[in-house]
Amino acid sequence: MLRAIKLGRLIYTIQKERDMSILYISRIGPGTKAFLIDEYDQTDKAFADMWDWPLEFTVHEKQYFRSKRKLINHINSRRNKLDPNSPDVYGEINFYSEIVEFFMEWMIERIRESGFGNIWKSLVVFQKITRCMLDTGAERAYGAMFFAQGNFPDQDLYDNYFRRIFRFNYNYKSATFYSDLVDPLIDSRSDQVTYTKSIRILRDEIKNSNFSGNYKSTEKAEDYFDNSTFRVDYLYSIQEAVASRVIGRINTTVKGYTENIIIYSVTAALVIIACPFIMSFSEALTSNMQEYSKILVKASDELNKERSKTDSLLYQMLPRPIADRLKRKSAVESEFFKSCTVMFTSVVDFIQLSIEYSPMELIDLLNILYSSIDNKIEMYDVYKVETINDTYMVVSGVPVRNGSRHASEIAYLALDVVSSVRYKTLLSVSTKQPLQLLIGISTGSVSAGVVGTVMLRYCLFGDTVNTASRMKSNGLPDRIHISESTYRNLNKTGIFIMSPRGKIEVKGKGEMNTYWLTEAVRARDKDPSKYTLPGEVDVLPETEATEFTSKAQGTSSDMRTSTNRKKISRSVNPIKMKGDSETSTQRKSVASGLGGEWNY
């Protein structure tokens, strides 16, 4: 940008030298060439202030523009040829105008390359005011020449004269929009009104002239030159003011950049100095973070282990689906299950045993019983509800519904437990006393839910639970006593052998038809879908129960014969009833595939 400002000053001096040269050869100014020497010195000084010539000009199509020295020599050659006795006014105007236009294009290019976005308006004003100086200087030369020679020699000079005036007005008016330094009312200024009025009168005279007239007037030529010079000087003062503003803003910007560079440099130096300390601190911090991460991982592992223990304990107290739901929310709503099968087991004469054996022996006996059944229920789709004293309660179909399979799952489990009891695998280590069990099973609907807030329990409620308990209480040692609803469910499968017990009096229920479950003719299928029943029987309708009871009493022997035909070659005689022969042979049942030896 500083180069553009110096170029503007150089253009001003070259224009002034041109106009003074025109005065000299037109014999308007002083008769001697001495006054021109001062202008030549100003121009040479402006050239001396310039920097190296741009490289792009070294290949300019005109030789004298390829270097500063060549251009100065070109100008000096013109100065030496200047002679008032053989004036060439138009040649003088064209000579200097070519140089001025060359520098003008160069200056505009420098302004475009300045790159200072915050001063672009001032740069536009500087460019336009320089154009105004160029056009006003040209108007001064043309006007003075018109009155010095009496007329324009051709139409082109006449048109060029008014073209300069029009371009001046356009550039000056547009410059007023970009800077407050440019006065839009220049013609009304007190210091300009006299010069402006005189120039307008002379312009009108040139405008109304014709090419055949002679308007030669040395006085008017001098007036035109002097008044236009005042206008050029005023424009030059505006150019200097704009240049000063631009330089001031550039200096402020450069100062800001310099301060930022100093700040960044100091910051960088501090960072470099502090870098070893930062690295040492980072290493220590990283080490601490790694140690903390190890502690955190260890704590997380311990927390997961404790959580696993808590979950394991919770799953022992509650069914897994119910426990998971309970963990997700504070309460679990009770559910109704349309069809399930409940089984109760208890030790025969447990009260008498509790009298005969010490507490430790009794606990040892119950631990063997409970542990054995606990191990067995893992192989079946059943859920252990609770144990109270010697009573062990199991259900299938709750809390996870399993369609029609609940009765079969409980039946297989019951046969497995009886097998263990019969072959004396459940013996107390302390007493060597074999156990006998009472087993009762019933099928029907129940309600289930979590009870309490401390020591939560998952409890079952309903007539099915009471009926299963009564089946156990009214059963016989090592016999599986089932209700009629369970019989109907198992009978549909065609897998189990059952025999009717007949009507018995049940406390709180009255007379009931009950049955003995004796064995299974087929091992439990690992794929439950292979024995899915066509429907479920939760509670027998009254009419069906009556009809079935009469048939069972009259045709018990036929039913026993019919079901015996379904047994395969390894099936055995039904478990012996009270009063049966002691010499009944014991054989292995196919039910040995249920998880143990099934010998009756």
Image: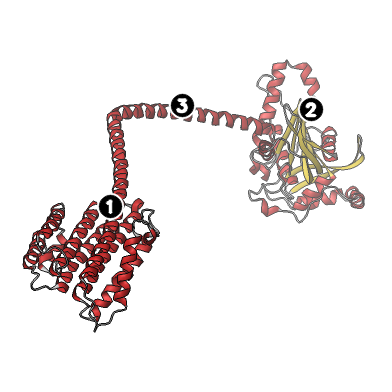
Q: 360 or 185: which is nearer to us?
A: 185
Residue 59 visible within the image? yes
- Above or below residue 375? Residue 389 is above
Give the residue type that dot 1 points to: Glu
N-term-proximal mark, 1 vs 3: 1
Q: Amino acid at mark 3?
A: Ile
Please tell me how crowded label 2 is: few (under 14), some (14-19), or many (20+) other residues with Cα within 10 Å.
Answer: some
Quarter of the image for residue 314 reads top right
Residue of label 1: 240
Front-lying residue, 266 or 218: 218
Which of discs 1 and 2 lies nearer the camera? The answer is 1
Q: CA distance from mark 1 to mark 2?
A: 124 Å
Kindly state the secondary structure of the residue where label 2 is placed.
Answer: loop
At which x and y percent is residue 239? 29, 55
Residue beneath disc 2: 348
Residue 264 drawn above or below residue 17: above
- Residue 147 falls left or right of residue 483: left
Where residue 122 appears, as percent x and y from the top left, is 34, 54
Quadrant for the C terminus in the image? top right
Q: In what element is the residue under mark 1?
A: helix
Asked if the residues shown at circle 1 and circle 3 are in contact, with their CB atoms under 8 angstroms apart, the answer is no
The numbered dot on residue 295 is 3
Q: Is residue 600 visible?
A: no
Q: Which mark is residue 595?
A: none
Q: CA distance from mark 1 to mark 3?
A: 75 Å
Residue at x 33% of width, y 64% of height: 196
Q: Nearer the viewer, mark 2 or mark 3?
A: 3
**Closer to the camera in the image, 571 or 92:** 92
The residue located at (77%, 53%) in the rendering is 492
- Say whether disc 2 or disc 3 marks the residue closer to the N-terminus: 3
